[in-house]
Amino acid sequence: MLKYILLVGGFVLLIKGADFFVDGSSAVAKRLKVSSLIIGMTIVAMGTSLPETSVSVSASVLGKNDLAISNAVGSNIFNLMVVCGICSVLCPMAISRDTIKKDLPFSVIVAGVLLAIGAITGTVQRWGGVVLLVLFVFFLYMMISSAKKARDASNGADEEDFKLMPVWKCLLCIICGGAAIAVGGKMVVEGASDIARSFGMSDNLIGMTIVALGTSLPELVTSIVAARKGEVDMALGNVVGSNIFNILFVLGIAATISPIAFTMQNAIDAAALIAMSILVLLFCASKKKLLRWHGAIMLLIYGGYTAYLFVR
């Protein structure tokens, strides 16, 4: 009974937390005269990636490295195929030029770097973790530079944006919403993992499916809420930013703490992530938006890959 209470309670916290988090974040974007895409790729992405950070770092400290890397890669696949897929089916998403030319290609490069580091030695050593963290600092620099340019370009913007929400309320929504998302995600993961283990599932399979889904629920709920509120840029930025954050920061920290074994299964999963990322990039580049049929194909691909995970 406790497992199911954790699941239900976790879902409630996730949904309400995401609602407050999106409201606070979108208000911050308007106050700072920064695009919702940049806020989505930074504040929202980092907030919704708290569960992945907690799970992967804890797994690394406890020596369960298989769970650490499968959780991060599995979460990225879920974010890309399911979160973007569902959002596209609900509301076709227009894609900005910067996303097509910079952000999505960078996420592909990041996944490629992880695969290369793991394939070279069969382990993501501490030096590999440092490389990932250095790339994360570079990513933050790019986002800060973009935010500064966007703010400088909108100095003459209408002051009406500043009346949207008081600063204290923005911060309260972000902090409380982020805390609810983190706690809710942890509750869902613990409840779902206990249920999965009772059926004899391996750590790798649990990491790629149950835990990946559970830790990606914040991204899913937050992106759906953002899309329904008209913050389409924030919905997409959340997914792309979270995927970059999961590999560069989450796995970077985990590998720096304790080297992570990189198995053939991990290599296949990373290669699948790269292929799926390229597919989404092609979808975006061809139409400058993600359409409903794109989303349907993405969901079908995820369903097929999940079926493969259970039989491999």
Image (cartoon, rainbow, N blue to C red):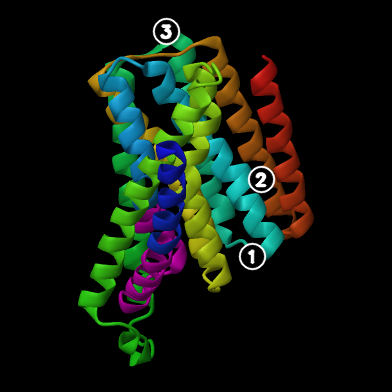
- Label 3 crowd (10 A; few <14 / some 14-19 / many >=20): few
Image quadrant occupied by the C terminus: top right
Residue 21 sits inside the magenta stretch: yes
The crowding category of the residue bearing disc 2, from other C-alpha atoms within 10 Å (few below 14, some 14 to 19, many at least 20), is: many
Mark 1 or mark 3: name the one nearer the start of the chain.
1
Residue 281, horizontal then vertical, whole percent = 64, 46
- Identify the residue shown where x is 42% and y is 61%: 18
The N terminus, quarter of image: top left
Q: Nearer the viewer, residue 132 or 185?
A: 185
Q: Name the residue tied to disc 1.
A: 94
Q: Is residue 86 left or right of residue 4?
A: right
Q: Residues within 10 Å of mark 1 (few under 14, many from 20)?
A: some
In-front residue for pair 196/304? 196
Pointer 2 or 1: first along the chain: 1
Left/right placement of residue 301 relative to residue 172 reads right
Where does the magenta region start and end?
18-45
> Regarding mark 1 in the picture, which secondary structure is present there?
strand
Q: Residue 292: horizontal and vertical position, in percent?
A: 75, 58
Residue 73 shown in magenta: no
Above or below: residue 67 compared with residue 168? above
Q: Compared with residue 264, is residue 112 higher up or lower down, i.e. above or below?
A: below
Q: Secondary structure at mark 2?
A: helix
> Residue at coordinates 33% horizontally, 37% vertically from top-left?
53
- For label 3, the residue is 121
Give the residue at the far left of this rendering: 168
Mark 1 vs mark 3, CA separation in Å: 40 Å
The residue identified by callout 2 is 280
